[in-house]
Every structure is written in C-alpha cells, then in structure tokens.
Image (spheres, rainbow, N blue to C red):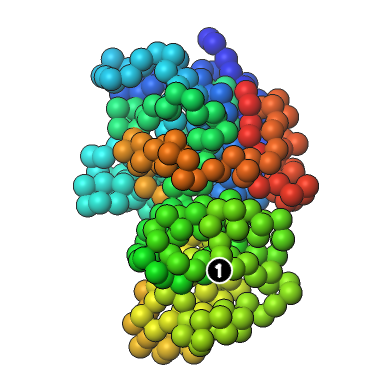
C-alpha cells in the first residue's frame, strides 16, 4: 500500500509526523499532491486540546497543490493542474448550503446537525499538512490557480484571506466608513485589506507589535495604534470626535479585544467577530447600551467552494492585494514539529509559515 508523510494529532500537546496510507479516490473526489500548505491559529488550538479532534487525524486546512488523480464524476479539471481548495469544502447539497451558509454544511437529520460542518480538512477528515490530501466533492471545491501566481501568493486564499474578507463583508462596510480592526495577525491583516477593498475611508489598525502595524499600513490602514502605548478605546473615540466607528472587527478571540471592539462602536454600528474563543464571553452592560444601541454582533466562518476561491484568486491576480509579506518563514514537512513550536510560541516575528512537502 503506497504511504505518505502526514502531521497527525496524537493527543493534546502532541502533533507528530507519521506515515499513513495515501487515500483512495472515490468518484466525487480528487487526490491533490500538496506543494505548499501552512499552519493556522486553529491548528494551535487543536494542538493545545482547546478544540477537540480525533487522535490520528491529519491536521491542516490550507492546500495548494497539483491534481494527482480525479474521481470519475469530476469534470472540467485535469491531472497535473495546479489548484487550491478552500479550508471550507462543503457539499452544496445540505440544508445549510442551500440556505446560503455553506460553511455550516453540518450533516443530516439522521446523524444530527453540527455547526462549522463545512470545515472538514483537519477537523472531520484528514487535512493538508501531508504529502497528499483527498478533496471531497471536488467538482464544487477545486479552483485552478492562474498562470504566473506562485504558491506563496495564493497560500492565504483557502482560509486566512477568505476569513479576513468575510469579517469585512459581514460588517457591511460602506464607502466612507471608519473601521477599527483589533489584532493584526494574519486574519486581522486580511480584514484590514478587506475593509480597504470595501471602501472604508479610515481604517484604524490595533496591535501590540509595531512590525505588524507597519504591514497593516501597507495593506490599507490609515491609523495604527499600539495598545501597549496608548489607551486604544480613548484614542479611537478621540479620533472620531466621540462618535465611534461605523464597524469594528475583532480578530484575536479574547475577552479584552472583544470588549474594546464593542466600546468603540457608534450606536447602530456593527461588531464583526472573527476570533476563535476558548472561554465564555461577557458583554458589558454599558458598552452594549443595555441592549438598546441598535448594534449588531455578527460572527463569520469563511465561505468555501470554487466560486469563493475564484474571486479571491482574481483579487490576487489583479494586484489589488499582495499577501506575500505574510509568509515570513518556510519549513519542510519533515520539520513541521519545529514549525509548530515556532508558530505556537510566536517567535522570530512569525506571521505565516509555508510548509513544503
């Protein structure tokens, strides 16, 4: 039986590179040979045991690769073609998909409905931190990579770019809006870029690392605030003349950033939450205006499917957004445990790590 290397979740605190069989290809599947993948903050939550997955599961959900083999029902693609697939790879047949929420694909009545069910790679099926990945419902989820684009240029499309943009879209940012983006990690940086594309006239980026704030400026931020040096809430209210921002995007997943994002909102503004939270949130009464502020709090899981990926690839190909600076480190798949150690401890200015099988 042909074997491949894969980064497998063993138990909380342990992800190890092991051998496992190359998967068989069903009629609706595609086998993709991974050329580049990466480590996501969600993978670190899995590593720490904060998000449960099965022992022995291959982790990772951001694939760039080459079609190795196609199932008999998959049409319009060819073996040897460069492709990506979204971290969210829905079937487009479920109730959630047909209701307009493909990320919540979620199963069926007989087995129960599960939130985030469209997120399958590295969650409910083997993921992408391996030499090969099996893409389910490939007809709906494979997206060809345009000629001339490198792996690093498109590596953010399957998840980070899609998620950050989804945060800006969910906030319903309009031309001329003032927007605050809390945390300038990879998702927050993409949210900053998405807010710019949506037409925001003033984007306020918040982080505690000056190097990240500099990247935020290159991606469209007009004002950068280091929360270690200023009271961010007071400064944003001063900058807006006490009015508050039209929209705030929370991209870290902490009570403190969530609360600050709510406190700077104008009445009628929207808080778009992208953080993955590992403990309960509380909503402060004053910041919530006792529930009478006409505010919206909305969460997003990045939409999937080939049309979403096509649109994101078009944005990259047009040159409107350059996300290559987010790839700060490169590791071989053989060294993925060292890459996890670097990324989980946020050393050496890491933003995203390119993993090369």
Kindly give the residue lying farthest to the right in the view shown: 348
Which residue is rendered at x = 53% and y = 9% of the image? 1
Q: Dividing the image into 4 quarters, which one contains the C terminus?
A: top right
* Residue pictured at 43% horizontal, 65% vertical: 200
Return the residue at label 1: 204
Residue 173 sits above or below residue 103 on the image:
below
Q: From the viewer's perspective, is residue 142 above or below residue 246? A: above
Badge 1: residue crowd in 10 Å (few <14, some 14–19, many ≥20): many
Residue drawn at point x = 74 percent, y = 43 percent: 341
Residue nearer the viewer, 67 or 247: 247
Visible in this render: residue 141?
yes
In the image, taking residue 292 as reference, residue 36 lies left or right, namely right
Pick the front one: 277 or 190: 190
Image quarter for residue 18? Answer: top right
Out of 203 and 75, give the one closest to the viewer: 203
Q: How many marks?
A: 1
Q: Position of residue 191 (x, y in %)?
A: 49, 57
Locate residue 335, reporting x and y percent: 73, 29
* Horizontal side of residue 90 vs 204, given as left or right: left
At x 42%, y 55%, the residue is 197
Where in the figure is residue 280, as x and y percent of width and height?
A: 53, 70
**Residue 252 seen from this side:** no
- As drawn, which residue projects farthest toward the top? 1
Circle 1 SS class: strand
Q: Quadrant of residue 6?
A: top right
Q: Percent position (x, y) of residue 213?
A: 65, 60
């Amino acid at each position: 039986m042909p074997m491949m290397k894969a980064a497998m979740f063993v138990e909380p605190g342990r992800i190890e590179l092991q051998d496992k069989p190359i998967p068989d290809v069903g009629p609706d599947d595609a086998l993709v040979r991974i050329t580049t993948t990466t480590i996501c903050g969600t993978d670190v939550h899995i590593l720490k045991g904060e998000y449960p997955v099965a022992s022995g599961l291959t982790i990772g959900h951001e694939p760039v690769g080459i079609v190795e083999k196609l199932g008999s029902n998959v049409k319009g693609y060819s073996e040897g073609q460069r492709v990506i697939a979204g971290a969210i790879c829905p079937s487009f047949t479920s109730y959630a998909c047909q209701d307009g929420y493909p990320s919540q694909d979620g199963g069926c009545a007989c087995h129960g409905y599960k939130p985030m069910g469209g997120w399958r790679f590295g969650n409910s099926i083997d993921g992408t931190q391996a030499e090969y990945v099996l893409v389910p419902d490939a007809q709906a989820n494979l997206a060809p990579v345009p000629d001339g684009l490198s792996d690093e240029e498109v590596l953010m499309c399957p998840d980070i770019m899609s998620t950050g943009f989804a945060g800006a879209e969910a906030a319903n940012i309009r031309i001329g809006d003032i927007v605050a983006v809390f945390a300038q990690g990879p998702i927050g940086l993409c949210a900053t870029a998405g807010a710019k594309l949506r037409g925001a006239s003033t984007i306020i980026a918040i982080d505690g690392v000056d190097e990240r704030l500099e990247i935020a400026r290159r991606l469209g931020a007009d004002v950068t605030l280091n929360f270690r040096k200023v009271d961010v809430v007071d400064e944003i209210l001063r900058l807006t003349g006490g009015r508050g921002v039209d929209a705030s995007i929370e991209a870290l997943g902490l009570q403190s950033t969530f609360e600050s994002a709510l406190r700077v909102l104008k009445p009628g503004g929207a808080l778009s939450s992208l953080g993955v939270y590992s403990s309960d949130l509380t909503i402060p009464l004053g910041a919530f205006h006792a529930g009478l502020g006409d505010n919206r709090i909305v969460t997003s899981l990045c939409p999937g499917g080939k049309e979403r990926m096509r649109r994101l690839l078009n944005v990259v190909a047009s040159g409107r957004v350059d996300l290559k600076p987010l790839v700060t480190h490169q590791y071989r798949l053989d060294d993925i445990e060292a890459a996890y150690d670097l990324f989980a401890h946020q050393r050496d200015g890491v933003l995203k790590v390119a993993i090369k099988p």
